[in-house]
Each structure stands twice: as structure tokens, then as C-alpha cells.
Amino acid sequence: MKRFASVAALLALLAVLLYTRYEWPATFAADERFRYDGPALAARMEFERTKDPATGRVPRERLLAALEQTRQSKFSVLNSPQKTNALVWSERGPNSDVTGPSNGNTRANSGIASGRIRAIIVDSSDATHKTVWIGGVSGGLWKTTDITVSPATWTLVNDFLSNLAIADICQDPRVGFQNIMYFCTGESYYNADAVQGNGVFKSIDNGVTWTLLASTSTYVSGTRILCDYLGNVYLATRGTGLLRSTDGGTSWTDITPSGLPSDICDLEITTTGAAGRLHVVSGIFTTQAYRFTDIPVTVTSATWTAPTTAFPSYLNRAEICVSGSTLYALPVDGSDQVPTIYKSTDGGANWAATGAQPTAGWTNGQGWYNLGCDIDPTSGGATCIVGAIDNWKTTDGGGSWTKISEWVGTVGQYVHADVHKILFWDGGNKMLFGCDGGVHYSSDKGTTIRDRNVGLRIKQFYSCAIHPIVTNYFLAGAQDNGVHQFSNPGLGNTIEVKGGDGGFAAIDQNEPQYQFGTYTNNVYQRSTDGGASWNTVSFSSTGRFINPYDYDNTANIMYCGDDASKFRRWTDPQTGSTSDVVSITNMTGEVTAVSVSPFTSHRVFFGTNSGKIVQVDGANTIVSGSAGTDLSSGLPGGTVSCINFGTSGSNLIICESNYGINNVWVSTDGGATWVAIDGNLPDMPVRWCMFYPGDNTKAYIATETGVWETALISGGSTVWTADPTFPAVRTDMIKYRSGDQEFAAATHGRGLWTSNISTLPVQLASFSARYINSAGVRIDWRTISEINNYGFEVQKSPNDHLNYQSIDGSFTAGQGTTNEPHDYSWIEQNAQPGRWFYRLKQIDLDGTVHYFDGVLVDVLTSIGDHQTPAQFSLYQNYPNPFNPATTFRFDLPAAGKARLTIIDISGKVVAEIANGQMDAGKHSLTWNASGFASGVYIYRLHAGEFVATKKLVLVR
């Protein structure tokens, strides 16, 4: 135990050191151009609120298990004969945004921002060089087939990946193997284990499906991943060194250069068809060192080559870029700046400072976190672009540097701040920039730059607020991207009313012309005219990076977090700036949750990062040095993330956000005693909680994998289910409006989502979808009544009921308003084989949309392929290895009985995929192995006298 205590103490010390090192300034520029962002502060906050108290670390490996349990829960809900009353969620985006008139963070060329991106790759299998893949930190994997058009059309590849920090992507460059892709996970530049990944994922079908490589489960902090022209893969990590795989990721060999740290900050390869020269830079917050090799396929830790003349080594990190024999290096010093850029023209053997440098301080003290560079491959090494806060370009080999983009302003080229990735491609003609605001594109080597962020819905919201009257009006605070104002129905656009980091938001529920947003700490943004204009009220740099507060709608007082054991009381938030700080003697720790009682005047509940819940009565007048009522007895001592109320002051629900503890607790006696209700929940952070409106026996929670709910609170036996229409993404807050029973949920990576529990305008009696062989898939539904119903669209999704798209030609007109039952039917012809979810999208006459629960259909035979196979055949399953689903294909030359079974290594039949009459033709069946253990299985096809078996591997 002493060992764990010392580790925890060390991690805490590192967090404090980084916090003080990067603490945000207490004063702000007069033009209110709030910086993007405080990455060290966000990291420190996230580390504290999610670490396992028993170990002092964030066990991100548990997230994968939680995601799998979430998937299984959704699948069970969708296939249950008795459907639950799960909320049906709709995505609100934003799909794009603009800056408001009060926002000092203006953007040139009407720029649009999305969210944080570290990984970009241009698909080499596309001869047009237009297909691009991007990986968000918490927004998933996205793809466009034409990055050159504006707006680009982005498609979410797989929602399961939304909760993974995608660090880098690579593709096998060999002709005939470009269907093989990899990505590594983990934000490796955060402090003290704050954000980890889950290993390396692989696709063998050009990104359609992805499988975690079991051999990489311990490689949780990836920095780079590369494929060479010989089929080998190289993985750079923080903490586990440099790895090489020669068998497609099945096994890995440690090739970290001897004597170098195991923290690899960059990896590049010079190759156009051979093994190439591999370049590596080691050292993240440790001494850097650079090495290279011309034998990457066989190099060992002992056979790397050191440069004759090296660039300086600092205690931080370095970024390099390479083209042919020319390299540029950006070493970050102890002040987190890049004081000097270095260059090599002999393949890395000798380095010298470039003749000139960008303006001093061009990395803004964030070089440890965001840095990128690349070389125009057609320039002979003369043209290089480097990026940090803004981007700088040289065309004379470093003899001079010119700023080519601005993160804020009305002139020049807009690229959002905090650049992580720069990429030349298509012979150096085109460029991409990845940053904390999304992706930006240039068709002329960086002379003109335009964003490609429309439709890239990856905003990282911390909070949301609902207008009490206006149906589609919401506020939401975003990491790196300010406070956003929603006012459109459906999936729409927003106004970023104020810039910088966006924290908590609030709208006065009695006088909604008064609205509030937050920057960091105790810096507030206020509107007194319903959100039309905003001004800043800055108290101090006290409080947390994202500081919690709650607004008393009756007394018009704001209660906010402050320093440890204190809260701030803002007594005139509607019009003034009068506040005082109140210390409470028994409120240990920093305030992490604030909740004003709706039942007792001037009673406020505070939760802290030491697990305390303190009730303060007379909060409007209480003086410093007073004590509150400690309600913490029996609670686990984690970080309290939410306190909420039921139908009376006696009914409370709270949650704590750490791994390794019971997260959700209820009280029926006003907090005197507590009962844990985690039940079957995975071990994961819970960030928000609330009772079902008007019912203390039901609840909703916002978790690391989306929204979960329970229909019956029953202590340790409580059964929770994941809402199947909600993405598997970290969710920070849920708010509710009683007037129309509307919910809003703020996700940290997939924007804002809403749902409603009121009576739908269409009462659906039944909905079914079934495969009818060569005719396609038939969808039937029956309505009991309809109100202002314009019509329906049929939607389908291949990705576990989460990535629905309307099917062209599926619109079916409704009946307007009627109390008579009506039957509807539509057939999707030429349905592709595989496993699909179908659902209904209902559209009101005013354009409002509603969604109904989906159903699962297995499309067995390729529609339109009428050629009868000449013989029986059983093909290898795909993908293999797999997790959790795989597809089997087989040919039947004649109609007859066929049976497809799964057999374990003991010879026992553990699953039956098909058993019955089947038509002649080519067949495709999908098996979901959720609930089955990892291992080797056999699948066997028995059709007439034909029997064939093959091996498949399930990898968890």
C-alpha cells in the first residue's frame, strides 16, 4: 500500500506542478480575445475527477470493457420482445457555426470550427486523391470522399470509436494492400496519465470495420503509427517505446534505441517503395534524442545511428518532418517554446539552425501540447510549414519565415488555434491542417486556406442550458470553442457568442432575457437581452478550470466554486458585478458541484473533489467561518460531479465521476443516509444524474459511454440500460424543461442531443422490417392516430443502431391529422447483404422531426446477383480476427436445407447461425459474438452432403 501511496502522491505533485506552470492569467485583453485553450488545466481537472482513488491513476483500459457492455446493452434493448421506454435521441449538432457580434475571437473568411483533431490521412486507394480520413480526440473516426469541395460531406465511420482518443492513422501503401489500415490511440502529451488510449485498431476492408489488436492492449499512449512499403508497421508510444510488427499487428518487437527514453514523441519514414530511412525522436518531458536507421525491418535497439551533429536536447519534446534527405526539427525548451528551428540536408546526420526564425514565442508556451510541421515534397526541402498557435512558412529553406494564418482576426487565412497536424499531398499541391477547431484545406500550398468543418459534428461540450419557453433555444459551453447558442430545429447551426474555452451555462428560468456563459475559472459572460449581445464579468482566476455554478432563479443569486473550502456568491448577476467569497469550515476540497434547492429558500448543496456534500442554509447571507451540514457519511470520497432533486427535498440523487467506486447514490431522507444504485453499471465515470421527472423510482445518468437509464431504482440490484439511440460518447450534462418535457444532453465529442417524453404527434401501433429475398427489405408500419403529420422517411444504419441515414426514395406522405388507423408499407430494393437496423423518421408539417425505435434485419443474399453458383463453397469469415461481429459467406448451387454452426475447441456447438431451407445463390450471414469468450472457434456449413469447416478467432 505504501508503494501505491507514493505513486499517487507523485502523480498529484506532477499535476500541481503543471497546473501552476500553465495557470491561466488572471487578467484578459481589452478586446476579449480569449485564448484557445488551457490544455494543461483541462488535463489536470480530468485526471482528478476520473482517477481511481485506490491506485491514483486513470484506468482507461476499463473503458473498453465499458464500451463493450454498452454495446451489449443497446443490442439487448433493440432485440427485446418487450421494448423499454428508452428515450429516443436526436442530434442537434452543431452542423456548423459562426461567431456572434460580441465575440472578440473573429474568424477571417467566415471560418467555421468543429472540434479537436490529431489524426489525418489521405486515402491512397483513391486515385483522385480526394478521400480523407480524420480522427477526433473524442469525436470518432470520420471520412469524406471529396475534401476539395466546400462543404465536404463527412460520414461518421463507427460510433463505437467516438470515445477513443485517435492519435494517428496509417495505411498500407502497397498496391493491392491499401485496404489495410491502422490507428493508434491515446493523448500522449497530457500530464500524469490523464488520458490514455486502448491500443491499436486495424481494418482490412478499407475502414469499414475496425478491430482492436489484442497484442496492443498495453500500448495505451500512442503518438505515431507508420506503414512501410514492405508490409511492416511501426508504433511509437509514450511509456512503452518504439515497436515493430512484421505480421500485421499479431506480434510486436521492441526496437527502442538503446539508452533513449521510452517516450517516443515523433516518428517519420523516408520511403517511396523500399524500406526507407526511419527517423525517431525520443523524449516527452524528458531529455530528447534523435536516431535514424536504413534497416528498419531488421534494426534492433542496439543498431540505430546517432547523428554526427545533433539538434539541442531539451526536457520536453520535439517534432520533425522529412522529405527525401531534408528534415526540419522543432525542439521544445523548458519554457514550452521553440526558440530555434533546426534543419538537416543529409538525411539527419548533421543539423544546424535555420537562418531565421518565426517571431519569438510563436508557440505561445504550448509547444509541449500542440505542434506540427511538413515539407513540400516538390520543393527540394526549401518549403516547410510549421504550426502551433498559428502557421508559419519558409520557401527558402529557413532563411525567412512568414505567418500564413491567424487564429483570430478578420483578415488573412483562418486556421483555428492549437495546430497538431500539417500534411502536404497530391505532389505538394494540396495541404491539410488538423487543429483544436477541426480540419482546414489549401489547394495552393497554403496561400489560401479554408476550413472543411461543415458537417464535422465533434464539438466537445461541458455543459448545456435550456430556455424555459423558446422550444429550440439552448446554450452549451465547449472545450476550445466558446459558448454556443442554438436556435434552430433539428440538426442545425449555432452562434459562438463568446470565444475561448466554454464552461457552464445558465438561463434565468423566470426572466430568460438574462443568460450566462463561462470562460475559465470565475470569468463569466452575460447577456441581458435574450442572447443578442454579451459582455464579460471577470472576478478572478480562482475556482476550477471549468468552474461549476448554479443560478437561483427566485433570489437571482449565482453560487459558484472558488478556492478550496470556499464558494463565491454573486449577488447581482443580472446587472452588476458584486460578489464575495465565503469559506465553510467543514467543506474540504474544491467545489465540483453546486445545486440550489427548489424546495427550501436559500438552501444550496455543494459537492467537492474530496467526496464531501455540504448543505448550506441561508446561503444568501451566511458569513465566512461558518459551518454547513455535512451529508457525506457513507459516500466513497471521489469527485462529486452532480447533485439533483426528486419530488421533494428528501429525495436526492448524486453521482461521483471516478473509476473504481460506486458512482450513483440516492437518499430518501435529505442526505442523512445514502444507498448506492450502481447495480449492473460498468466501472466508468458518471458525470450527471437526475430522477425521471415526477418519479423517484426512475433515473437518467450521463456517463463515459452515453446516457443510461433505469426503470426501477433498487439499490445494488438496480438494472441500467444504455439508450440505444444515443452515441457511445462521454456525456457531461443532462438538462430538462418541464413545459414540453424536453431533455438536452451535452456530449464531449459529438455535440448536443435532445429527446422528449411527451406524447408524440404520431401514435405508432406497429413497425416491422423483414427480408423478402429478391424483392429486398419490406418495411411495414401502422399508426393509431396522427397530428399534423407531413410524412415519414425510412432510415437505416449498419453501425449498431447509431449512424442512421435516410434511404433515397423512402419518403411516404402522412395523413395530416386523423384519428383513424392507417397502414403503410415501403420496400427497399437492392438491399446490400449484411446486418442492418431500420427505423422511422416522422416529419411534422412545421418541419419538426421525431424518431421511432429501430429493428434489426439480416439481409442474407446479394440482391441482383442472379447467377447460380456452380458448386458449394464456404469462404473465410470477415473480418478475422474480429470483435464482436463477423460475416460468413457461402454459396449454394441448389435450394435445400443448410445449417451453419459455431463450435468451440472442445467440439461443442455453441451457436447456430442458420438452420433451414435456403435458396440457391450467394449467401451472407452475420454473427455477433457478444457474450462469448475470446479464443479460437470453428464454423461449419452442412448443406446436403456438403460439409466444410474453417477457423475464426474472437479477440477481446
Image (cartoon, helix red, strand yellow):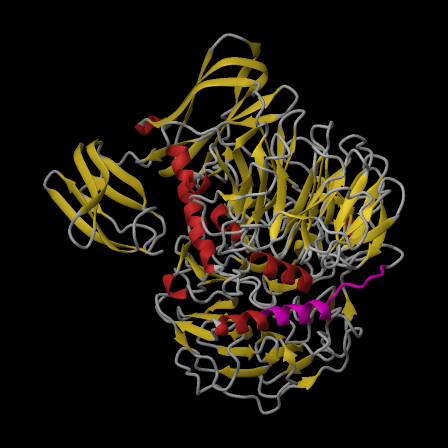
Instruction: Give 582 or 70, whichever is nearer the viewer.
Output: 582
Q: Residue furthest bottom?
A: 308
Q: Classify residue 187 as left or right of residue 384.
A: left
**Is 418 located above or below residue 716 in the figure?**
below
Q: Residue furthest top?
A: 820
Quadrant of the image occupied by residue 445: bottom right
- The answer to whether one can see residue 419 in this image is yes
Q: Classify residue 603 as left or right of residue 726.
A: right
Quadrant of the image occupied by residue 474: top right
- The tally of labels here is 0
Q: Which residues are magenta?
A: 11-28
Instruction: Give 243 or 771, whichever is nearer the viewer.
Output: 243
Instruction: Give 41 or 920, whichever is nearer the viewer.
Output: 41
Which x, y percent locates residue 565?
72, 57
Task: Specify the quadrant that holds the C terminus.
Answer: bottom left
Which x, y percent locates residue 142?
54, 50
- The answer to whether one can see residue 868 in this image is no
**Is 443 located above or below residue 373 in the figure?**
above
Which x, y percent locates residue 629?
67, 47
Instruction: Give 1 or 355, whichever is nearer the viewer.
Output: 1
Q: Classify residue 510 as left or right of residue 781.
A: right
Q: Residue furthest left?
A: 945
Q: Residue drawn 69% across and 60% down?
A: 444
| Magenta-drawn stretch, dominant element (helix, strand or loop) | helix
Which x, y percent locates residue 649?
64, 34
Task: Please check the rendered image and state whether residue 114 is part of the magenta-colored stretch, yes or no.
Answer: no
